[in-house]
Amino acid sequence: MRQMRRIGRILMAMACVMIMLSVELTPVMAVTWADIAALKDDASDLGSQKKELQARLDALANDKSQAMARKKLLDQQIANTSAQIQNVESQIKNYEALITQTEGELVDAQEREAAQYELFCSRVRAMEKRGEVSYWSVLFRASSFTDLLSRLDIINEIMDSDQKVIDELQALQLEIEEKKTQLEDSKAETEAAKADLVAKKTELNSQRTQANQVIQQLVSNENETEAAIDGLEEEEAAIQAEIQRLNRELAAQQAANGQSSQSNPGGYIWPVDSRYITSTVGGRASPGGIGSTNHKGTDIGRVGYTSPIYASKAGTVIVSQYSNSYGNYVVISHGSGNTTLYGHMSSRKVTVGQYVNQGDVIGITGSTGNSTGPHLHFEITENGVRVNPLNDGAEPRMGYLTGYTLSGTA
Ligand SMILES: [Zn+2]
């Protein structure tokens, strides 16, 4: 937008000078068009060449696909880890349920122990009252049922029925204790495994966040690069609009000076000695991903960097400058709505306002601007519309370019 405003201001300034000049009947183009040199600076403001941008875009696309592949792997890892964590969590739940159950069994066993002990004690008391077994009194010093059981080993004298019950209780208690220990070990192991997996999941989640940030950054860089390329295309459109405006101004000048500004359609000659066409007006694949995909001109190849470029038709030079898209380019006005444009020159040999005869050298071929190799980008505009310079036989037009070879056919 800044660019457009600047171009607009310059064009307005030029229009003012034009009006002054026409009032004074000063010879057309004498000084006025020097202002166009200012556009040169604007053009360089547009930033990097499309070629560089495209290379960056390709590199970014590469980075992006790598980042996307990395993200995909991370997502798979995360899904896998999440499933593992879920599995471990249900294992832990089962272990916890078993532990609760075991704890219940232990309480139950302890209650049975206590009951058995109580029964045992009352029996001994009864025996003592009858004066039958005084040695049982030793057992009353026991602090608990467990203590009692160990004392029994020493005494080694007890009723068979009681001994049997005590043995069973002892075995049960051991079994329950072992089971509880086993379950608590398993629970601890499972909880450690869970902690590892939770840490792994956290790490993977953070990697995924980073990968997403990288992807977002890459996409945003890609968008910026695409915006810059769009800027070049906007520049081409702005240049075309500017050419039409300049051409109208020139025609108005010429009319004011009593000169004819009538266009004489046709009458073009080849602008270079080569007849080798690498691209015609209309759609084409963008070569190497660089260059316009909707081609507005005719590209003539096999010209190298040193071939002369001729004025295809006599006229007044209305543009001779550099742009990011056309590189060094020249536009010649041939009358109302009729211009020719010559792009990607290595050097320009004419200045704005200069009158050129048909066949005069206006520049040297090259590959400046948005170009992949040396060629002449040539455009003919008639009635303000770009037309096909080539006589393709479908619509015979006198004076239009013939005798060429299309790339791919020779
Ligand atoms: Zn071209």
Image (spheres, helix red, strand yellow):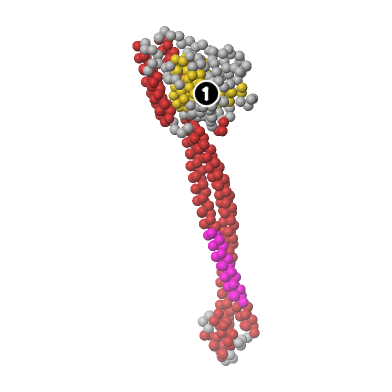
Mark 1 near ligand 1 (CB under 8 Å)? no
Label 1 crowd (10 A; few <14 / some 14-19 / many >=20) = many
The kind of secondary structure the magenta stretch mainly shows is: helix
Whole-percent x and y of residue 250? 43, 15
The N terminus lies in quadrant: top left
Q: Is residue 320 left or right of residue 93?
A: left
Q: Amino acid at mark 1?
A: Ser
Q: Nearer the viewer, residue 359 or 168?
A: 359
- Magenta residue span: 171-196
Whole-percent x and y of residue 268? 54, 15
Compared to residue 162, the image places residue 357 above or below, namely above
Whole-percent x and y of residue 162? 62, 83
Whole-percent x and y of residue 288? 56, 33
308 magenta-colored: no
195 magenta-colored: yes
The C terminus lies in quadrant: top right
Residue 260, picture quadrant: top left
Q: Which residue is found at the position 57% from the left and 17% from the top? A: 401
Count of numbered marks: 1
Q: Nearer the viewer, residue 255 or 115?
A: 255
Q: Which residue is mark 1?
A: 307
Q: The residue tagged with tag 1: helix, strand or loop?
A: loop
Q: Which residue is found at the position 47% from the left and 18% from the top? A: 332
Compared to residue 44, the image places residue 66 above or below, namely below
Residue 12 visible: no
Q: Which residue is found at the position 53% from the left and 19% from the top? A: 271
Q: Which residue is found at the position 58% from the left and 13% from the top? A: 397
